[in-house]
Image (tube, coloured by chain):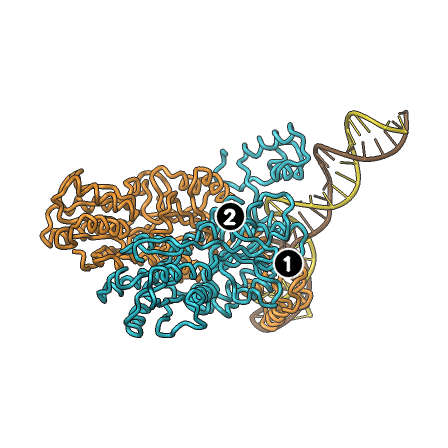
Chain colours: A orange, B cyan, C yellow, D brown
Amino acid sequence: MSEPSGPRPTLEAVAALAGVSRATVSRVVNGGRGVREPVQERVRQAVHELGYVPNSAARTLVTRRTGAVAVIIAEPETRVFTDPFFGRQLRGISRELAAADTQLLLMFVEHRADYDRIGRYLSGGHVDGALMFSLHRDDPLPAMADRAGLPTVYGGRPGWAGADRAPRPLYVDTDNRDGARQAVRHLLGRGRRRIAVITGPLDQTSALDRLDGYREALGVPAADPRLLADGGFTASGGERAMARLLDSAPDLDAVFACSDLMASGALRTLRARGRRVPDEVAVVGYDDLEPAAWADPPLTTVRQDVEEMGRLMARLLLRLLEVRRADGTPVPVPAPGTGGARGTAAAGTAGARHPNPMQLAPVITEARLVVREST
Amino acid sequence: MSEPSGPRPTLEAVAALAGVSRATVSRVVNGGRGVREPVQERVRQAVHELGYVPNSAARTLVTRRTGAVAVIIAEPETRVFTDPFFGRQLRGISRELAAADTQLLLMFVEHRADYDRIGRYLSGGHVDGALMFSLHRDDPLPAMADRAGLPTVYGGRPGWAGADRAPRPLYVDTDNRDGARQAVRHLLGRGRRRIAVITGPLDQTSALDRLDGYREALGVPAADPRLLADGGFTASGGERAMARLLDSAPDLDAVFACSDLMASGALRTLRARGRRVPDEVAVVGYDDLEPAAWADPPLTTVRQDVEEMGRLMARLLLRLLEVRRADGTPVPVPAPGTGGARGTAAAGTAGARHPNPMQLAPVITEARLVVREST
DNA sequence: GCACGGTATGAGAGCGCTCTCAAGCCGGAT
DNA sequence: ATCCGGCTTGAGAGCGCTCTCATACCGTGC
């Protein structure tokens, strides 16, 4: 506490001051199991006096644990910071990791070259595990993590989940299909008959699943191409998609936009073209984040607890790390539903002393319609 | 490349395969200075064959460098992820750090307890330096970084900058005062006479400086309290502030909101109260981020290149680390303007072999009015 | 009195890397 | 031939920690 600069004190120094061995100090610093109370007290006193802080590199070198996890966002476009979705999820993750004293390493993938750097990083033993978001089809990241033997949890169901590929991926997702069904049924219930859909990029499962829900609710084998447009999950994409839809199907009386951001874009186009909402065209969004509440008129939307999803991802990963550490072997992941967890079940007992590996299963959270003035 | 699991290969293994010593492999891995080409080739071959990746903990242990910097966001409220400002800045930082192969550790401070954890972390040698944002008055973080001897660059001028306290802080900011002056002069130029201001939290220098610019442009020693309201830099805060202003000064004909987000909130209130924009009330925002372009009507605002500010922060820190490494001594920071750098000058020669310590100065970037329909 | 099991502490090896220093080698100047 | 300087390479110490193993110590039960 007294020497601000100069070499940082080591275990050795603390041991000398406390009149014990390095090993004993190490024990005290790591919980003190098997050290008598008076000795512990002496050691803690010395630690305080010298302002000792363990050197993380040395610790990592021998324990093979870094106490950090990587959060990788594979979104090449500007979406990450214009869509509050990522921020919210990140916040949930950050909170949960902080509670477990685990550090968060943020990495963005924007260019081809980034994959190299990140691949090297993941195999470099810098982190204990990884959280990955918003993967598109054929993203090389999962294979990299797999090869590096790095425990990974995905945000959103990865494309190969359910396929034969082993090991089964661990992920957190909402029930996109059901959410979309609720949205479209709501529109049908209000008498709308020409319901268009603005989808996300169709190489992402969340976008595909929402489109599937739309089809199911309508009871059609495939969506009418004139009523379908890809808005790329961005506001300006939603704007353009809405324009295309109005051109190809001028008689539409409702739009289901697969994200609030796209819905807000759609609202702008509708206003520009003089279509009144919801009188002439009803609009439903998805996410229930800021853009929904601020839109004019406020959006009917499908609520998903994004922050909670982030927290669940973090908990799942921390749990996976705990289990791995206990027995060293990779853990089989049951499919969601079949003995797996639903809702927050998997994380409910995060404090259990002996984690049950069977709880390491994908988590599907609920989606729920929130009705506002746009419908 | 063949063994996916099993213990990761070490320098030793590579050395054995290449038929050289550990030291030589180390040299090749770190650039190969002083190693003959055929030997280098043999080593690289072995590295490739074994899929060798250096162990970062071991390296850090001896070099005392981690290759990571902490980004600390001291925003207790939900502002961080609703205001695109942070995201943009983070993006700039992330890009610049990635280019320098430096990792980004993200930490949020939300509760009192977080300070402890972060303090410990900063003194634990986990990172080589820190970037801090959005500090409020009396934030304990700068003192912590200082005590830990951690090179730090601030986003936005810290409160004590210019005071006697040594060492002078290194920061990146825009010319908030000038930006505000431009905004208010613009309103005056259009014949507005009762111009209100919605400020940010007045324990932040950026909020204070913008308020100062407002006063200067109006040529008054202090703002009329009926024309001033704190909007806390949030959308809903702007909404409430606008309502208060309309109550206390019903005859106002213009509002300068010190962020786009607050301006969008103000627009909502104005619309709700039936005041036409810009006919009855002109509105100017600040930032020129998404909310400005999407607002209805689109906002006249003061543009600052937020992403560039992030990049500059990162560059400044990297530079500082480079200099520290070279001579080990703390570097004096000249005041901005007095021999310091303006605009991007400080970062212009980032690739110089022998960095000039004199370039390690606060950077003030330009603010520029962008006129749109709201005025 | 002595063997015994259990617990508290210390000694010391080693985690994987970098870096200093000494040794070896070569060509050119003496 | 001899020496010198520069360049390339290897040997080995050591970064700060954890963890195994041996040792010392204690109280029991025979």
Camera-nearest residue between A344 and A257? A257
Q: Which residue is mark 1?
A: B332
| Mark 1–mark 2 distance (CA, rounded to whole Å) | 24 Å
Q: Position of residue A211 (x, y in %)?
A: 22, 44
**Residue A341 appears in the picture as rendered:** no
Tell me where residue A370 sits by quadrant.
Answer: bottom left
The quarter of the picture where the C terminus of chain A appears is bottom left
Q: Which residue is mark 2?
A: B97
**Left of A45 or right of it: where is A260?**
left
Residue placed most toward the observer, B99 or C11: B99
Mark found first going from the N terminus, 1 or 2:
2
Q: Are marks 1 and 2 in contact (CB under 8 Å)?
A: no
Snapshot quadrant of residue B278: bottom left
* Coordinates of residue A96 in the picture (x, y in percent): 41, 59
Q: Residue at x 23, y 55 (%)?
A: A302
- Callout 1 crowding tier (Cα within 10 Å): few <14, some 14–19, many ≥20: some
Viewer-side residue, A21 vs B85 = B85
- Whether residue B125 is visible here, answered yes or no, is yes
B259 and B11: which one is in front? B259
Q: Residue at x 17, y 40 (%)?
A: A247
Q: Position of residue B182 (x, y in %)?
A: 42, 59
Q: Amino acid at mark 2?
A: Leu
